[in-house]
Amino acid sequence: MGRLWIVRLLVCAPFLAASTAWSADVHGRSSTQFLWFNNFFDGNKQAEFAEYLNMSITNIDKAGKFSIEGYGRVSQDVRNGEGLSGRLYYLYGDYRGLYDKVDIRVGRQWVNYAAGTALIDGGRIDLRNIGPIEFSAMGGRNVVFSLNSESGHEGDYAYGLAAHLAGFKNTNAELSWFRKLDEGDVARDVIGGTFEQYLFKNIKLYANARFDLASEVFNEVLAGVKYYPTADLILTGEWFQSYPTFDTTSIYSVFAVDRYQEGVLRADYSINEYISVSGGYNRQEYSEGASADVYEIGTSIKPNKKLTINLSYDKRNGYGGNLNGGTAEIFYYPVNSLELAGGIQYDVIKRDSLTNEDYARKYWFGGKYRINNRMSTTVRVEDNVNINFSSDWQGRVVFNYDF
C-alpha cells in the first residue's frame, strides 16, 4: 500500500507542477535516469530506469509561511525482473513564523541533532526569538529502508530535544538528547553537543561529541582548529576518536570493541589563480598499540579558463596493510554549456606480509550539457578493475528538467 502511494504521488506530481490553477508556486527538478551496474549482493548485471522528483510548493498562504517539500523516486528494473519499486525520502509541510516564534514541520523528514539523526514520519517544532537560547523537539515513527522497501516494525520510534545558542555572531553551540526505540525497546539513548568559535577573524575552533548513556562511553569526539593566516592559506588540525556502539537490541552490542582515534594535520594553499596545492598527514591508532600513517599531497592546475587538471598522491603504511596510489582528473569546458571530464585512479595494495601486492584501478569519463535554462543532461561511465572484478562497467545517463 505504501509503495503504491509513493508511485502515484511521483507520477502525478509533474501534472501538478504544470498546473496554474492556483496561485501557489511549484518548483523542483524531474531527473529521469538510466543506470547500469553490478548488483553487489548477487553479482548480477543490473539495469534500470529511475525517476527522481524533487519538488517545493511555496506561497500557499498569503503570508508565504507555509510550504510543502518533497523528494522521492521510482525505479523499474529492466534486466532481472525485479519490477517496480519506490522510495520516499521526504515529504512534509513546513509552517514558519507562527507568532514569529514557532516553526512547525509535519510529515516524513530528516532530522539532524548533535546527539543523533533519523528519518521520521512525525513532527518537529522549533521555538525561536525568545532569547539567547532556542529550543527544538521532534518525534515520530523511525523510518528504516531495506534494499528494495521499508523494513521498520511496529514500535520503532525516534524522538529528541535540542537547545542551541542564538544571536551570537562568532559562537554557535548546541546541546541535544536523542532516543531511538526498536519495537518498543530503547535501542539508542545519546546526549550530544556541537561547538564553534571564531577568533581574531582568522581562527575557527570547533568540536562535536556524542555520549552513549547505555554504554556510558563517548562514542564520537571531534576537536579541531582552522587557521587562516592569509586569504590563500588554510591550516587545519583535528583529533577524532570513535568507540563503536550498536543498538542495544542488536546482537553486535554483546561483542567487545576497541577505540579508534586519529590526528590530522593539513594545509591548503592557492599560489595564484592558476595553481593550488595541498598536503596532509594522518596518524591512525587502533587497539593494542597498532597504528598507521597516511600522507597526502595534491595540486590543481588551471592553464586557462577552459581546462582544469587535478593530481593527487597518497601513501599509507601500518596496521591493515600498505597502500600507494594516486588520482588524475581532467575537466574541459569547450563552451559554457558543455563540460567534459575524465579520470584515472590507481592504487597498489599490500594487505599483509603473507599476500602479494594487488592493484585497484578506476577509469571514468563523463560530460554535462545544458540544453537551455530548464533542461540539462549528464553522462558518466566508469570501469573498476580490482581484486574482486576483472572488469566492472557501470554508469548512468541523466536528463534533468527544472520547473
Image (cartoon, grey):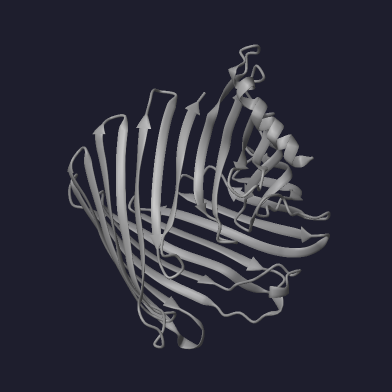
Q: In this view, does 333 lie above or below 193?
A: above
Q: Is residue 66 in sight in this rendering?
A: no
Q: Please state the horizontal and vertical placement of residue 346, each as a whole percent of the image.
A: 32, 64
Camera-nearest residue between 67 and 300: 300
Instruction: Give the quarter of the image for residue 95.
Output: top right
Q: In this view, does 113 lie to the left or right of 291?
A: right
Instruction: Give the quarter of the image for residue 291.
Output: bottom left
Camera-nearest residue between 244 and 200: 244
Q: In this view, does 298 lie to the left or right of 367?
A: left
Q: In this view, does 278 lie to the left or right of 397?
A: left
Q: Is residue 69 above or below residue 388?
A: above
Q: Residue furthest top?
A: 21
Instruction: Give the quarter of the image for residue 355.
Output: bottom left
Quadrant of the rendering where the N terminus is positioned: top right
Measuring 49% from the left and 61% from the top, which residue is drawn there? Answer: 207
Q: Please state the horizontal and vertical placement of residue 165, each as a whole percent of the image.
A: 57, 48
Q: Please state the horizontal and vertical placement of residue 176, each as a whole percent of the image.
A: 65, 56
Q: Please state the horizontal and vertical placement of residue 73, each as a whole percent of the image.
A: 61, 39
Measuring 44% from the left and 26% from the top, which residue is drawn there? Answer: 375
Measuring 57% from the left and 80% from the top, which residue is drawn there? Answer: 258
Camera-nearest residue between 79 and 267: 79
